[in-house]
Image (cartoon, helix red, strand yellow):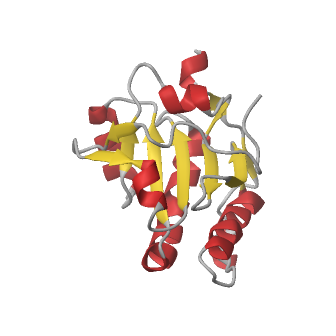
Amino acid sequence: MPLEAGVSAPLLTTTLPDQDGAEHTISDKLTEGPVLLAIYKSSCPACKTMMPFLNRLQERYADKGLTVYGVAQDSANVTRSFIRRSGIEYPILIEGDDYPLSKAFDVFGTPAVYVIDQQGQITYTTQGFMRDQVDEIGAAAAQLVGEAPAPVITEAETEEVPRFIPGCPGKHLD
């Protein structure tokens, strides 16, 4: 059963490399502020839609302490290509073939997005892509950094952004 809001996020002390080989430990970032964690795979249409919107939250709240991490269920080469194509500006961690976070978070569909407070508690989670939930993710992040929520998807974009895109099975389930 996927993890829900109100439970402790697992494996936050796990160290993973990013797309450039730099090591990151999520628990280290929690000392600075909340973390938004998005587990994805690049072949998933729902992920291709969701991941660029998370740039806006990084831009909006990074100076307030929010860290956005993508967690790729892909190789470093595929991840670097995905970053270039989608314009992602936050670090993407490479999970590796054992998929430790996907398994620990019991990801059954991607993208799986978790907003985690500084105490390591999940305050919001969603899997797949639903346009309305993008703003809910933004509101959860805003609350943790003490800001008023603001739409992530602009009014002009609502015509272009689908309401729903089915997520893909988590790669560790393939």
Q: Residue furthest top?
A: 174
Res 63 quadrant in image: bottom left
When the figure is inspected, residue 31 is found, relative to residue 168, above or below; the finding is below
Q: What x and y, as percent, mark residue 112?
A: 63, 42
When the figure is inspected, residue 173 is found, relative to residue 144, above or below; the finding is above
Viewport quadrant of the N terminus: top right
User: What residue sits 49% from the left and 59% below the top?
Assistant: 30
Viewport quadrant of the C terminus: top right
In the figure, is residue 28 to the left or right of 130?
A: left
Res 81 quadrant in image: top left
User: What residue sits 66% from the left and 29% below the top?
Assistant: 106
User: What residue sits 68% from the left and 84% below the top?
Assistant: 148
When the figure is inspected, residue 149 is found, relative to residue 19, above or below; the finding is below
From this viewpoint, is residue 94 visible?
yes
From this viewpoint, is residue 159 visible?
no
Q: What x and y, as percent, mark residue 77?
A: 26, 34
When the figure is inspected, residue 158 is found, relative to residue 1, above or below; the finding is below
In the figure, is residue 7 to the left or right of 110?
A: right
- Circle count: 0
In the figure, is residue 118 to the left or right of 70?
A: right
In the figure, is residue 70 to the left or right of 15?
A: right
Q: What x and y, as percent, mark residue 24?
A: 34, 47
